[in-house]
Amino acid sequence: QKEVEQDPGPLSVPEGAIVSLNCTYSNSAFQYFMWYRQYSRKGPELLMYTYSSGNKEDGRFTAQVDKSSKYISLFIRDSQPSDSATYLCAMSSGTYKYIFGTGTRLKVLA
Amino acid sequence: NAGVTQTPKFQVLKTGQSMTLQCAQDMNHNSMYWYRQDPGMGLRLIYYSASEGTTDKGEVPNGYNVSRLNKREFSLRLESAAPSQTSVYFCASSVDGGNQPQHFGDGTRLSIL
């Protein structure tokens, strides 16, 4: 079993839809959680960073962490074609070794 | 702001050749990392440098060496390239250790024939 599981997609939604992206994990020591967006042929770009459980909102993006269920989510409201990318979750227990999900490909249709 | 800069962007090598991938960051970060990204495998840590003067192995260090040249620069060397090392290589940096988010460069696409 992988430490972090992420549905690879692709996920296709119409413009304006609410998108839900998810990761599950097995290591209860993870405390720091991140979401990255990666456009084709580019490096991952940090979107959200949260510590422990709870919600964090930044514009159209909301990150949720449920440590009891070992489940994290990223919600995108009013999705735009420019949101079409691969979304990676990442987590750390506080060491230098981050664990990344394999990414979910999202396509927002105009 | 340049952030994390990687050179070259593309490279084709023959089996057995050597090369060095360069990475530089201008954010005054202490920690730097090298990852490889393969389809269906996600990002896997090759080596990291917690601070200037230190380096440590990650998940997949075999066949690679690194040098933390100074606080800004962290290079990755393939001594004798193998086809299994065909991948996209990303350099990242963070202020400090595992409780800080990492910032990535745009990668080096490496093909080994």
Image (cartoon, coloured by chain):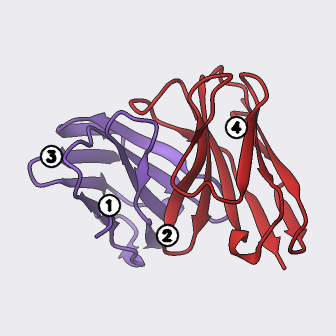
Chain colours: A purple, B red
Crowding around mark 4 (Cα neighbors within 10 Å: few <14, some 14 to 19, many 20+) is many
Image quadrant occupied by the N terminus of chain A: bottom left
Of badges 4 and 1, nearer the viewer stands: 1
Separation of marks 2 and 3 at Cα, in angstroms: 24 Å
Q: Does residue B51 lie above or below A51 as drawn?
A: above
Residue labelled with disc 1: A4
Q: What amino acid does circle 3 point to?
A: Lys
Residue labelled with disc 4: B4
Q: Does residue A15 lie above or below A94 as drawn?
A: below
Separation of marks 4 and 1 at Cα, in angstroms: 26 Å
Task: Judge by depth and name the residue closer to the eye, A33 or B31.
Answer: B31
Q: Please, which chain is the residue tagged with disc 3 on?
A: A
Of badges 2 and 3, nearer the viewer stands: 2
Q: Residue at x 20, y 46 (%)?
A: A65
SS at mark 1? strand
Q: Residue at x 22, y 57 (%)?
A: A26
Contact (Cβ within 8 Å) of mark 1 with mark 2: no
